[in-house]
Amino acid sequence: MTTPPGGGPWTAYCANCPSMVTLGSAALHGHHIVMKGDRFDANAAARKILYKFRINPYCGCANLVIARNWCHSKACADRVLELLGSAYNEQTASAALAAAAREFADCKFGTSDQADEVDPITDQ
């Protein structure tokens, strides 16, 4: 899924999620916390955890945040999987996603991540 249901940019889709969080103010886009695609093995493993707890990894608001367009890296994917690893229900999985989103705000995954942007329309 490269574009959200109904088309348009992911940022607009995210803005319609209840209780959507916006982190930062520069180069904002609709950010999938568990990234789409098969770029990193951790993404597929993290998506399995989301599915287990009935969180849609593509359109589910719990897996979306409006944040700066950066941190699309292996280190980021690994950290998200690490945070999700202790989840035991939908609430704890959502809390792990929120913790990861807060880390996106500062891109705490390494300096190379800060230049790791994706297409703001497709989020890939």
Image: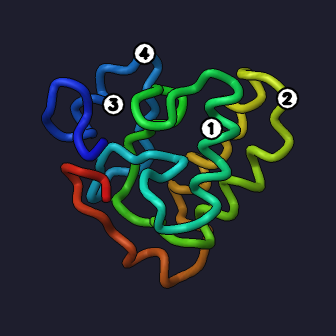
User: Which kind of residue does numbered mark 2 sit on?
Assistant: Tyr
| Image location (x, y in percent) of residue 99 | 67, 43
The residue pinned by badge 4 equals: 18
The residue pinned by badge 3 equals: 14
The local crowd at label 3, few if under 14, some if 14 to 19, many if 20 or more residues have their Cα within 10 Å, is many
- Tell me the quarter of the picture where residue 1 sits: top left
User: Which kind of residue does numbered mark 4 sit on?
Assistant: Pro
Seen in the image, is 107 located left or right of residue 97?
left
Question: From the viewer's perspective, is the residue at label 3 or at label 2 nearer?
Answer: 2
Numbered circle sitting on residue 114: none
Measured Cα–Cα span from mark 4 to mark 1: 14 Å
The residue pinned by badge 1 equals: 98
User: Which kind of residue does numbered mark 1 sit on?
Assistant: Ala
The local crowd at label 2, few if under 14, some if 14 to 19, many if 20 or more residues have their Cα within 10 Å, is few
The residue pinned by badge 2 equals: 88
Q: Residue at x 34, y 60 (%)?
A: 69
Measured Cα–Cα span from mark 1 to mark 2: 15 Å
